[in-house]
């Protein structure tokens, strides 16, 4: 059974940093791409893609709007993917999700919600003044 278990998150002040972790199990880690999305509850919007990574070669992908403040990385020995978030702003307040999909035959780098078929439980990040 594929499982993605998230940790990290919480309350942080403006300008602060947080690191989210996503521990994967139930599949061959190097055959998958993992990504981070976020969603603001009640906004009526879908999940926004923040970053993805091919765990086989470590190649990260970011939307242009997220380059610089968000960094995705993977530790294949620990089957874990991380999202380092710096210079956080109130607009970053959301529920953050880890997601996974097989690398082969998918457009995982496009960071589209429907491409990913396994999801973590979500973790709240709140940025306050």
Image: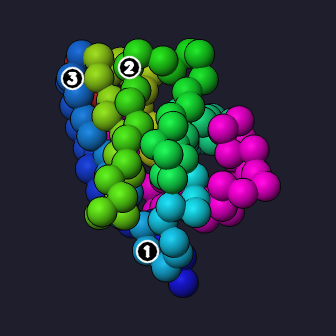
Q: Residue furthest bottom?
A: 1
Give the camera-side residue of 46 and 78.
78
Is the residue marked by circle 2 packed among few (<14), some (14-19), or many (20+) residues within 10 Å? few
Q: Position of residue 19 (x, y in %)?
A: 27, 40
Mark 3, secondary structure of its residue:
loop
Residue at (55, 27) in percent of width and height: 62
Q: To which residue does mark 3 refer?
A: 16
Query: Which picture quadrant has residue 23?
Result: bottom left
Percent position of residue 79, x then y? 37, 63
Q: Is residue 124 magenta?
A: yes
> Is any part of residue 128 visible from this angle?
no
Residue at 66%, 38% in the rendered image? 109
Is mark 3 in CB contact (under 8 Å) with mark 2?
A: no
Give the percent coordinates (x, y) of residue 107. 75, 44
Residue at coordinates 24% horizontally, 16% vertically from top-left?
15
Please say if 32 is above or below 53. below
Mark 2 = which residue? 69
In terms of sequence position, does the residue under pointer 3 or pointer 2 come before the other? 3
Mark 1 or mark 3, which has the lower sequence index? 3
Quadrant assignment for the C terminus: top left
Q: Nearer the viewer, mark 3 or mark 2?
A: 2
Look at the numbered discs 1 and 3 and tell me whether their residues touch, using CB distance below 8 Å.
Answer: no
Q: Between 101 and 114, which is closer to the camera in this rendering? A: 101
Asked if the magenta segment contains residue 107, the reply would be yes
User: How far is disc 1 from disc 3 in space, using C-alphas?
Assistant: 30 Å
The stretch of residues the image draws in magenta is: 98-126
Q: In this view of the protein, which residue sits in the foreground, 20 or 41?
A: 20
Location of residue 24 (image quadrant): bottom left
Q: Is residue 48 visible?
A: yes
Q: Is residue 120 depicted above or below 39 in this figure? A: below
Q: According to the image, label 1 marks what residue?
A: 25
How far is disc 3 from disc 2 in space, using C-alphas?
11 Å
């Amino acid at each position: 059974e594929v499982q993605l278990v998230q940790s990290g998150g919480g309350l942080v002040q403006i300008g602060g940093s947080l690191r989210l972790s996503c521990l994967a199990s139930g599949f061959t880690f190097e055959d998958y791409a993992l990504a981070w999305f976020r969603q603001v509850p009640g906004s009526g919007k879908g999940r926004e893609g923040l970053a993805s990574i091919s765990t086989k070669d470590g190649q990260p992908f970011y939307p242009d709007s997220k380059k610089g403040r968000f960094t995705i990385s993977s530790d294949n020995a620990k089957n874990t993917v991380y999202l380092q978030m710096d210079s956080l702003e109130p607009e970053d307040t959301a529920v953050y999700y880890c997601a996974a999909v097989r690398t082969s035959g998918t457009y995982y780098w496009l960071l589209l919600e429907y491409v990913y078929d396994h999801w973590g439980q979500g973790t709240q990040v709140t940025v306050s003044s």
